[in-house]
Amino acid sequence: MRIALFGYGKMGKEIEKIALDRKNEIGLIVDAHNLDSYAIEDLKKCDVVIEFSTPESAVSNIYKCFDAGIPIVIGTTGWLKQWEEVTKVCREKNQSLFWASNFSIGVNLFFKLNESLAKLMNPQTDYNITMEEIHHIHKKDAPSGTAITLAEGILKNSSRKKNWVNKNTHMPEELQLISRRTDEVPGTHTVRYSSEADYIEISHVALSRKGFALGAVLAAEWMKGKKGIYGMNDLLNL
């Protein structure tokens, strides 16, 4: 399978390595140096695009893939205010889009654990819910897409929290979500239920970018020839 890579930073290079290890071919690499110079015809020579660029260029890249008629797997976060518009165009043009806030298989299992725990803890009103996410200093968006997915999973299953806020809060209806940026941390996400007597905590700690990259390549292989809008639940049958 011929894969086009949009974004060639640390994540893009890890995706390239895993894709080649799995006997795929890299047909095109697009980064800041050639973002405005590659042609739609170059895209059409590939089977699928994996997009890990920037929030500023992601939507433009998506539309170029729609024009080329090529499936796109998107790992970039920070552009979701345009989600409704992008998915509407995808359906109208009968194109293909796979998006995940996190491609790690472990994280997607963690999402399900988080929802189950929120449902279990909902009647336990003595416990307050808080969240923290830690990433490397180069990450452009805060909170992370993964943290937002976790927060939304809690809100969907907890009647006590009405919205999340990316700051310290003492408002009982607000879910506190603190973002920290430090060193080269790939990603740590923690959900805590605290009472005066004890606390319950679940965490996912990424040890490297390898898990994210493998998930993206698996998604790209799975998307070949498909039409529609998909995510990790479809890939993993969750």
Image (cartoon, grey):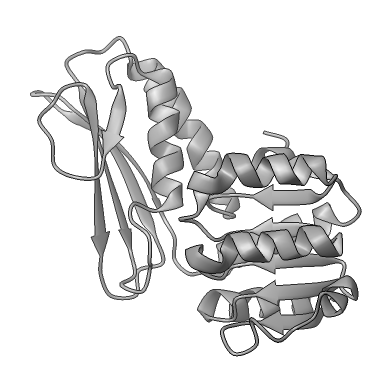
143 relative position to 213: left or right? left
The residue at 27%/16% (across/down) is 160
Q: Quadrant of residue 176?
A: top left
The residue at 30%/9% (across/down) is 123
Q: Quadrant of residue 174?
A: top left
Depicted 118 relative to depicted 43: above or below: above
Depicted 108 relative to depicted 27: above or below: above
Q: Position of residue 56 (x, y in %)?
A: 49, 66
Q: How many marks?
A: 0
Q: Position of residue 190 (x, y in %)?
A: 32, 45
**Residue closer to the observer: 153 or 39:** 39
**Residue closer to the observer: 206 or 101:** 101
The residue at 82%/53% (across/down) is 222
Q: Residue reaching furthest bottom? A: 33
Q: Position of residue 49 (x, y in %)?
A: 75, 66
237 relative position to 170: left or right? right
Image quarter in which the N terminus is found? bottom right
Does residue 236 appear anywhere in the picture? no
Q: Position of residue 109 (x, y in %)?
A: 55, 40
The residue at 36%/56% (across/down) is 188
Depicted 88 relative to depicted 97: above or below: above
Depicted 141 relative to depicted 40: above or below: above
Q: Quadrant of residue 142?
A: bottom left
Image quarter in which the C terminus is found? top right
